[in-house]
Image (tube, rainbow, N blue to C red):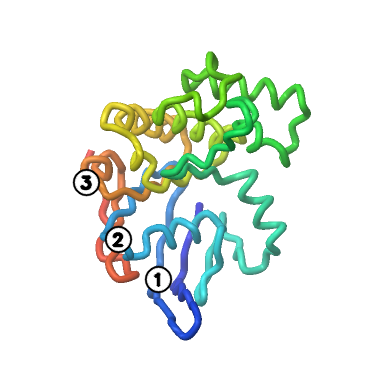
Amino acid sequence: MIELQSVTKRHVVGDVETLALNDVSLHIEAGEYVAITGPSGCGKTTLLSLLGLLDRPSTGRVLLQGEDMATRSQAQLAALRAGRIGFVFQSFNLVDELSVADNVALALRYGPLGAAAQRERVAEVLEQLGMAHRAKHHPRQLSGGQQQRVAIARAIAARPALLLADEPTGNLDSAHGAEVMRLLGELNNSGTTLVMVTHSAEQAARAGRTLRLLDGRVLVDAMVDA
């Protein structure tokens, strides 16, 4: 589905250059559940940004369904993200001024659906995630777990083939975190490719495959026994 070929990523700030990823090659198949682990600063979030087409490598290639993304403009990459890739962030990234339904609808703004179809899809995903009764509320009126469920609803509203989650339970208590992990597992079971960054060994064990990064390199790439 998505592939990195000898990817290196350098961040340059002034005279300081940081090597975030160092010659990483990786292939993720459609339908996989992959956990990315490793200590802080090892390159996990950088790797997720490259997989999500939010950033470009310094060297190497990123291929989506066999096509080199270096040939795509920023506008084309944005269109690909809107149609194929969903994001779940630790900080939720909801817009306080918008209702729950309007936050979810943001994911459909630039898609092919008309207004009526967008409203129908928003209602569908909120029902799926148990948040239909909160559609008219605002994020500040919700608990952390409820906000994360809204964020997941927004991430999957456009039916992305690839869902990227960056520490999706990092701001949640254990009960709400367990609920989010259950929801992510259900999405993967329904066919969504899931790549998740986590510091939790317990959460990583839920995945079918674990990548452990260290100093910008993939130290371990292991399939998890069923």
Looking at the image, tell me whether mark 1 or mark 2 is earlier in sequence order.
1
Residue linked to disc 2: 40
Q: Residue furthest bottom?
A: 15
Left or right of 48? Residue 84 is right
* Of pointers 3 and 2, the one earlier in the residue sequence: 2
Say which of 39 and 2 sits in front.
Answer: 39
Do the CB atoms of the residues marked 3 and 2 lie less than 8 Å apart? Answer: no
Q: Secondary structure at mark 3?
A: helix
Amino acid type assigned to the residue bearing label 1 in the image: Ala
Question: Dot 2, crowdedness within 10 Å: few (<14), some or many (≥20)?
Answer: few
112 vs 72: above or below: above
**Amino acid, disc 3:** Ala
Against 172, residue 59 (above or below) is below
Does residue 68 lie above or below 139 as drawn? below
Reading the image, the residue beneath label 1 is 20
Q: CA distance from mark 1 to mark 3?
A: 22 Å
| 3D distance between C-alphas at marks 1 and 2 | 11 Å
Q: Residue at x 26, y 60 (%)?
A: 39
As drawn, the label of residue 5 is none
Which residue does the image show at 64% across and 45% down from the upper left? 82
Q: CA distance from mark 3 to mark 2?
A: 14 Å
Q: Earlier in the sequence, mark 1 or mark 3?
A: 1
In the foreground, 217 or 16:
16
Q: Residues within 10 Å of mark 1 (few under 14, many from 20)?
A: some
Looking at numbered disc 2 in the image, what kind of residue is underneath it?
Ser
Q: Nearer the viewer, residue 122 or 93?
A: 93
Place residue 74 in its image quadrant: bottom right
Residue identified by numbered label 3: 201
> Would you say 116 lies left or right of 140 here?
right
Helix, strand or loop status at disc 1: strand
What residue appears at the point 48 percent right and 38 percent down from the top-left corner? 192
Horizontally, residue 44 falls left or right of residue 98, namely left
